Image (tube, helix red, strand yellow):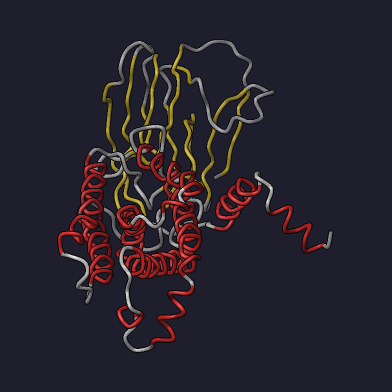
Amino acid sequence: MSPLGRIQSAFGKPFMPAVFFASGVTYDTLTLTRIDRLQDNLILLLYLVSLGFLIVVTGRLGVAAVEPAAIEPHGSSFARFLIKGRPYYPMAIQFLLGGLFSAYAIFYSRSATLTRTGVFLSVLVLLLVGNEFLRDRLSNLRLLIALYALASFSFFTFFLPVMVGTIGTWVFLLGALLSVGVTLRVVELIYRRNPDRSQKEAVLVGGPAVALVGVLVGFYFLNWIPPVPLSMKFGGMYREVQKQDDRFMLSFDREWYQVWKRSQNPFPADEPVYCFTAVFAPVALNTTVYHHWYFRTSSDKPFTHADKIPIKIAGGREGGYRAYTFKQRLDPGDWRVDVETEDGRVIGRVSVVVAERGDTGATARTLLY
């Protein structure tokens, strides 16, 4: 067998799609570094525009026979080229959807926590995996328009805050409106100058996508969407925090063998405790986050509010904006600090068990951050 034949045979193995999928996600994880990186966002925007174009062409070709002039009235050669490429559209659409949802899953995973904000991330991960099995269904116009609405919504949710330098309800709603607008524009381009298709059909195709965006807006008010583009880079509990030049000295105790520990847990009762966090925000984004302290006396009881302290942060630093809050003393029990946005979405969480002091033999350590 020739070398080319061996390569083609290897690519035909049943496990190769899984290999390519894992490789693609790994590559995106390593290369998509910052959510405010202009080059990455321009690539995603190009993917989104290209996806919209392919959906328009697929829609105009897929349901009814269309004359070439109906697709491109200014050049029949280009129209013939589009028709000739029709068998490859599902593969191209699948590639673009995979690239978009892979990037979204990575960006949103950096802002999600094991709280309600993980719901939307779970949807993105399911779509990322499910996209590998959707090729045979990517001629379904309703499905395509719904996926495009979700892809647009996911993009504008983090892209607009990066561009305008602020986060909040009005920015989110503006992104939702933009996603509805571009989705309806795609539907309008599919049915424009086509008497064979009715307005009712256009509503049936676009209606589910608009309803989907409405559901996602509900996700936001339920705090089910991660607070992109914010993300927590680091967090922990310490016995003392001091600033030295441009770095913070974080003091804590640990046993000699606990080389992995970078903060103190458990923490002795009746001593000052510092909660230190580093929250990443894009360049030029200034906002307020909160250290929301919670407490419970035992694991069989719910956490209750203890304190909520505002912190103004500025964006741009790779390692995140560093800040801390402290308490003079904590009662024995389970404590946690949720780092929250102004609308209550959880960026990150720091937990600690407070117990009466015991002789542990732990030694003092200092971490520079």
**Farthest residue toward the left?**
200
Residue plotted at (49% across, 31% down): 238
Residue plotted at (35% across, 12% down): 297
Q: Is residue 354 left or right of residue 8?
A: left
Residue plotted at (36% across, 32% down): 115
Q: Give the x, y percent position of residue 361.
A: 63, 16
Q: Give the x, y percent position of residue 203.
A: 18, 58
Height in image: 272 above or below 21? Answer: above
Q: Give the x, y percent position of residue 103.
A: 47, 54
Residue plotted at (29% across, 37% down): 309
Q: Please identify the quarter of the rendering in which residue 314 is found.
A: bottom left
The residue closer to the viewer here, 93 or 252, is 93
Q: Give the x, y percent position of residue 332.
A: 39, 14
**Farthest residue toward the bottom?**
74
The residue closer to the viewer here, 118 or 5, is 5
The residue closer to the viewer here, 38 or 66, is 66
